[in-house]
Amino acid sequence: FKLEKVDDYDPPGTRVKASISNPYACTMSRNFMRNEELSKSIKMTRVPNHVIFSIESVGMASPGVLMAEALRILQGKCRRLINISEEKLDDT
């Protein structure tokens, strides 16, 4: 991780923010919670819509093709879920 200033108006060394330099290696360890002083002064947050993943391809399909196909299938499942939800709402 690396330390960054939170605000330009704060005196030097009073408030810093630790940001992860390699998100792939982050395990969201919460060991700091065991220390009473640290648990009161540290706030751990996540970016809500940020997901990191990798695609491994062994066969003939490239990772890009696999990703496109997976998204097409997911999109179809989402459409079916929306249709079922709308039908249930119409029935009530």
Image (cartoon, rainbow, N blue to C red):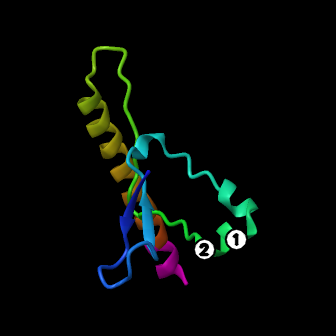
Badge 2 crowding class, 10 Å Cα cut-off, few under 14, some 14 to 19, many 20 or more, is: few
Which of the 4 image quadrants contains residue 8?
bottom left
Q: Residue 34 sits in which quadrant?
A: bottom right
Query: As displayed, is residue 14 above or below residue 31?
Result: below
Q: Between residues 75 and 11, which one lies in front from this camera angle?
A: 11
Q: Position of residue 32 (x, y in %)?
A: 66, 59
Drawn side of residue 39 relative to residue 44, left or right: right
**Residue sitting at the far top:** 59
Q: Is residue 81 above or below residue 70?
A: below
Q: Main secondary structure of the magenta part?
A: helix
Residue under label 1: 37
Give, as a single range, the part of the protein colored magenta.
86-92
Q: Is residue 89 magenta?
A: yes
Give how far across and how far down residue 77 sits, in percent. 41, 52
Residue ID at (70%, 63%): 33
Do labels 1 and 2 touch, CB within 8 Å? yes
Q: Judge left or right: residue 90 versus residue 57.
A: right
Spot occupied by residue 83 in the image (x, y as percentages of width and height): 41, 66
Q: Secondary structure at mark 2?
A: helix
* Vertical relation: 57 (above or below) 53: above
For disc 2, the marked residue is 41
Q: Quadrant of the C terminus?
A: bottom right
| Picture residue at 45% right of the left edge, 75% below the top | 15
The picture places residue 9, in percent across and down from the top left corner, at 32, 85
- Amino acid residing under circle 1: Glu
